[in-house]
Image: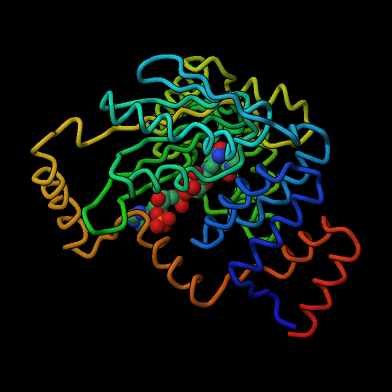
Amino acid sequence: MTDTVNLSLAEATSLSLDILANTGLSKSQCDAVTDVIIRAQRDECHSHGLYRLLGCAHSINIGRVNKNAEPVVTDVAPSIVKVNADHGFSSLAYSRGIELALDKATVQGLSAMAINDCYHFSALWPEVEPLAERGFAAIALTPSHNWVAPAGGIRPVFGTNPFAFAWPRPKRQPFVFDFATSATARGEIELHRRHGKPIAPGLAIDLDGEPTTDPSEALKGAMLTFGGHKGSALSAMIELLAGPLIGDMLSIESKAHDNEAGAAPLHGELIIIFDPASFLGKALEQNMNRAELLFEAITGQNARLPSQRRYEARQKTEAEGLDIPRALYDDLIKFLPPPQYEQRTEKLSQR
Ligand code: NDP
Ligand code: PYC
């Protein structure tokens, strides 16, 4: 028996839908959450792929996530949309509000969508990449739980606070980056702990403020920001823009609200959308081509663009399916009811 399991995209999708449906989550949330998880797994973003189902199922089963959340979209200003996620997952709120936000960006040149009261677990690029495919540039920001010490400090203040950006490219896949403002995502440290592997130096400190490469000590202590004071300032910006500016919680508040329940963070998210056609009018094509000079100057010296690895992984998994650790598969199917659990175990043993 190998220590990995290969699943087609369709099999992974039905596994995710079955696990979530078994928690009693509404169909619309099951679909929205599965979509973002399968996209991440497809692009081999392991920290935010199928692994996340463990945390989602836990957050639902302990009664934190509203299983029947119905996001409420409010048109608050000519360029601002607010979506209250009704204590459901952010993914459904995003899909309910995004078309109005895009309409506003088209009319006003730029718009912002604030999502409030959402449980958030996902990677952000699945939210901005599709916007760039439709010709918009976009930024997404969100806090999390306070796990990250500010530069110069040892006590956690910031969330892992990801920042995603997408830019449309004529006849090419968009330019997209998406990273935590901590030196790595917390999910990566959790995966190192699961696999019994040390983390790289410089990512975290233990409870005494000493550098550590032990993932368990890192998770108990504090993570560090990327780029020292620069990542620290960017992380503070994300707290402010996707927290108080939109009337939602800081990472410190989200963690206090969690009260050690171990649920996904509950807070807000901010998405800012730019319409290049409104900024540029007739000069759109010329300037989109000028932007290509930048990408050519990067790739022309064999440096890679962010997302290049993802796009290559996508091509591979679409053809060959997804490989996930057997231990993860075994943990996932424990969330299924007995007949489905047995069916999947049986199917696997026949391979
Ligand atoms: P990484 O440090 O792996 O950085 C990811 C970004 O950097 C990707 O766009 C990646 O492109 C790009 N990149 C990596 N290496 C290179 C390179 N050598 N040259 C050019 N570009 C490169 O990611 P993180 O661990 O910081 O974050 C992982 C995910 O976790 C993100 O998707 C983020 O949204 C998510 N996250 C979500 C949180 C939440 O609260 N919801 C909190 C924190 C993180 P590529 O993918 O092609 O390698
Ligand atoms: O990996 O840091 C992380 C994370 C936090 C919330 C969702 N992912």
Q: Residue at x 14, y 34 (%)?
A: 280
Q: Position of residue 235 (x, y in %)?
A: 45, 29
Q: Quadrant of the N terminus?
A: bottom right
Rendering colour mode: rainbow
Closest to the observer, 125 or 159: 125
For the point 20% across and 56% down, which residue is it? 298
Please give left or right for residue 186 compared with residue 141 in the image: right
Q: Position of residue 313 (x, y in %)?
A: 45, 67
Residue at the (27%, 23%) spot, across then down: 108
Residue nearer the viewer, 63 or 95: 95
In the rendered view, tell whether residue 350 sits above or below residue 166: below
Q: For ligand 2, which image quadrant applies?
A: top right
Lateral position of residue 72 relative to residue 282, left or right: right
Closer-to-camera residue (347/108): 108
Along the line of sight, which residue is nearer the eye, 53 or 17? 17
Query: Does residue 224 appear anywhere in the picture?
Result: yes
Q: Answer yes or no: is residue 155 visible.
A: no
User: Which quarter of the image is occupied by the C terminus?
Assistant: bottom right
Q: How many marks?
A: 0
Task: Determine the residue located farthest toward the right in the rendered image.
Answer: 338
Q: Which residue is rendered at x = 39% and y = 38% of the image?
A: 227
Q: Is residue 323 left or right of residue 227?
A: right
- Relative height, residue 10 to residue 294 (above, below): below
Is residue 38 shown above or below 248? below
Q: Position of residue 292 (x, y in %)?
A: 16, 52
At which x and y percent is residue 282?
A: 9, 37
